[in-house]
Amino acid sequence: MIINKFQGKTEEEAKKKAKEKLGENCVVMNVREIKPKGMFKGFKSSTYEVTAALEEKEDYGYGSISKPKKISDSINLTADEDIVIPPPEKEFVIPKTPIRPVTRKQEIPQEPAANLKKANIIEQNEDEVLQSIEKRLDNLTNLLDEKNIPVNPLSQEELNYIRLIYSTLLDNEVNEKYANQVVEEIEKTIRPGNNLDMILSNFYQKLVLRFGRPQAISLNEHKPKVVFFIGPTGVGKTTTIAKISSKFKLDAHKDIALVTADTYRIAATEQLNVYAEILEVPLKVVYSSEELNEAIAEFADKDVIFVDTAGFSHKNEEQRNSVKKLIAEIPAEIEKEVFLVLSATTKYKDLCNIADIYKDIANYKLIFTKLDETDTYGNLLNIRLYTKTELSYITTGQNVPNDIELLDTQKIVKQLLGGN
Ligand SMILES: Nc1nc2c(ncn2[C@@H]2O[C@H](COP(=O)(O)OP(=O)(O)OP(=O)(O)O)[C@@H](O)[C@H]2O)c(=O)[nH]1
Ligand SMILES: [Mg+2]
């Protein structure tokens, strides 16, 4: 979906610009008269702003090789600035089902201002923030239900706009269940006549809240911290360890050691050994949880020990148990952290199965690899919501050490909404 704004001296001029830019098939979502302001406003006339949208697939003609211009500019609105959860509005619409006109309208007394700045929200537990917003909305819904007061329906433009955003989320493979949940919430918070930017901004806020705050590996004075990387075969565990090790050693000047418990393939140890040599960090190969504990004792003065594990198919119970044992049996006083490494190219259903199987092994945070191999990032949100676990790093290519970063929530949400 492409959404853009066009201005003109008349409504027709603005619409003409929209059609020139987006083509005849574009849909005019909103027309706004911009009244002149300032001392000389009496001498100036109004201008008009048209918000027009185009379903992206309509733009791919035969033989077209370049992608159409995307929505990122239009997403660059209030949501791009500090994230503010608006206080309940005086007029409040409570629709019964998603994406359907609503039928009632109510005056709600304004609650105390709840303008939460982005920083505050992010520092709080995201679930708590979400819960408190949902609770407040529930209260308002109940109030309306009790009073049984009529509400105006949303305009067709508003409903179309919500539909467009909804279908963009689905195009980006956000699971229908989660997309519906967001839409239901949006419908509770918008009211007829809401600026379309406000609707988009609402989607943006709700998605950012759902992603939560990505968690980096944090080191403290307890040495050594042991960090395990687990996950299916070939997702990029070893490569990700190499990238993270390099950042910790060369950028953060931490004292690190590597351990590999992946002894199922000869090449696996060799692969990590190459990285260990380049980084000049010690590497131990371990065959059992006892040997892992010996290695941890040997590396007791290190800041962090990264442990590579063997990828296995879901069905291989023996390998699964051996990884579980490795993690479970390290000494209780040693601080540990586990990352489940998943490829962004894996299907949602398979990711859910994998997430379930590894949940049985340990509590983990999520790393997504191979974002460079897909254009749709909905699964990051899906699995975050499915597992209720935190996201952390993403990797975007084979280059060690550069192709890794902490997930940038705002960037990914923009992409889910159709931005670049
Ligand atoms: N395109 C792309 N390739 C990646 C990325 N991360 C890793 N790879 C590639 O994926 C392949 C497998 O990476 P490994 O690090 O060996 O994967 P693994 O999970 O350790 O695999 P096993 O040890 O066999 O379970 C290699 O060719 C990597 O270069 C990434 O972010 N993007
Ligand atoms: Mg490996």
Image: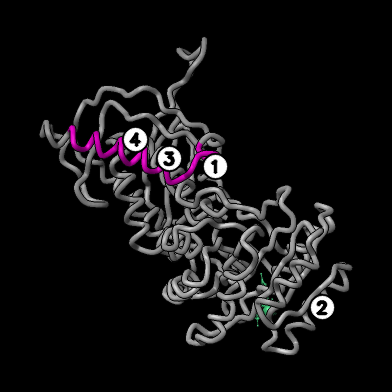
Whole-percent x and y of residue 328? 57, 69
Vertical side of 285 occupied by 405: above or below: above
Nearer-N-terminus badge (4/3): 3
Whole-percent x and y of residue 112? 36, 22
Which numbered tag is attached to residue 194? 4
Which numbered tag is attached to residue 129? 3
Residue at mark 4 to residue at mark 3: CA–CA distance = 23 Å
Residues at marks 3 and 1 touching, judged by CB atoms closer than 8 Å: no
Q: What residue did someone put label 2 on?
A: 273
* Quadrant field for ligand 1: bottom right
Q: What residue did someone put label 1 on?
A: 76
Nearer-N-terminus badge (3/1): 1
**In the image: residue 305, left or right of residue 360:** right
Residue at mark 2 to residue at mark 3: CA–CA distance = 45 Å
Residue at mark 2 to residue at mark 4: CA–CA distance = 59 Å
> In the image shown, does 185 or 170 lie closer to the viewer?
185
Tell me if the residue at label 4 has its CB under 8 Å from ligand 1: no
Nearer-N-terminus badge (2/3): 3
Residue at mark 3 to residue at mark 1: CA–CA distance = 24 Å
Secondary structure type for disc 2: helix
